[in-house]
Amino acid sequence: MGDAISSLLFQPPPPTRLKESKVIWLTNSHGKRIPSFFVECAVDERSGEGIRAPHPGEASQHYHRGTDSDHYGKGGGCNSVPSSPHIRTPKELEMTVAMGHRLGHGAPTILYSHANAEDLGNIYPWCKFLSKMLGVNIFAYDYTGYGLATDQGPPSEDYCFADITAAYAYLTYVLQIPPSSIVLYGRSLGSGPSCFLAARTAEEGEAVGGLILHAPFLSVYRIVIDSGCTLPGDRFPNVDFAPSIRSPVLLIHGTKDSIVPFNHSERLLETIIEPYRAEPVFIKGMGHNNVHASVRPMFIDRLRRYFDSHVLPNITAKRMLGPSRISLDSRRRSQNLARLVNVDGVGL
């Protein structure tokens, strides 16, 4: 029965390719190797904050806080700031950390968990777009059995949980990004591992900085049957993880979603403790798979409002504690995760 459910739940697309030099290989606690990538946003050299590109209807200075020459005029060399988001190689990231540049202490980092019929190759343009428009770094990973990890065996719920744990360990232990600077973004299937990790970090006493759930479900079985409880054999019971979450949660859902019913987000919102409920983004007429171009300005604006109200103030407060204290707190917890995973070429 379990294999039958998994075959219906997980439907990886034909693998797409990324340049090998851009891929960060992680090994999860089950010994499965999964690929990932890191998109770094443009950063204001003076404040360390991520630079947002303007979108139609908004003045550019509201997001850039200065002129292009202010941000990019110091030019050249390995210390120069990128003029637009770009994918970073593992060696570049290791060098950045070794040189003392603290990723994630001004610009948030999204840990992105993609939907079912996607892999790293085909979500890269979307991740780069989000990085540019939101002024955030984005770390995305593939699930076991997807993309370049198709040779690692079939995907499963346990593997997905181990995969996101390996990705989180890389961010916190290797790149030394504090949990308060990490925002989990789970789209559809990705809401499962994202809710799991958000609940786990809260239970361990150091919740992540935020959680964005895009077209999430209560649980897999509940998509088909409106059960009053989590049935044996169910997968990704987000509704059971939600009450433990202690991060601000933003729900995004289209009212015309024919894959995951819209009311899943409405009901999931009710299970989240009230202080952590951000104003949801329920988009009239939008379906499951795409954020249509006609609603993207509103979509980006609402995401920005979420970061400005719920994420960035906490990052600023943590920075005031001083880098040594933040690093120590984060490192203690991430070392426990690091015992369970390996990052190729980093020597954990």
Image (cartoon, rainbow, N blue to C red):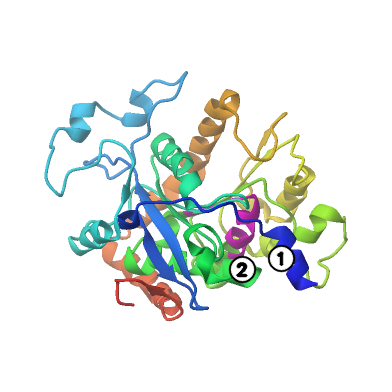
The residue located at (34%, 57%) in the rendering is 20
Q: Check if residue 184 falls in the magenta segment.
A: yes
Callout 2 amino acid: Pro
- Which of 170/24 is in front? 24
Give the percent coordinates (x, y) of residue 104. 35, 54
Point out the image quarter for the N terminus.
bottom right
Q: Check if residue 144 falls in the magenta segment.
A: no
State the image quarter where residue 321 is shown. Answer: bottom left
The residue located at (65%, 50%) in the rendering is 188
The residue located at (37%, 53%) in the rendering is 38
Q: Which residues are magenta?
A: 183-196
* For residue 290, side relative to residue 260 (left or right): left
- Residue 6 circle label: 1
Looking at marks 2 and 1 on the same chain, the residue that comes earlier in the sequence is marked by 1
- Residue 154 circle label: 2
Give the percent coordinates (x, y) of residue 13. 59, 52
In the image as oriented, which residue stretches furthest toward the top?
Answer: 57
Which element is circle 2 on?
loop
Give the percent coordinates (x, y) of residue 297. 53, 26
Give the percent coordinates (x, y) of residue 159. 58, 70
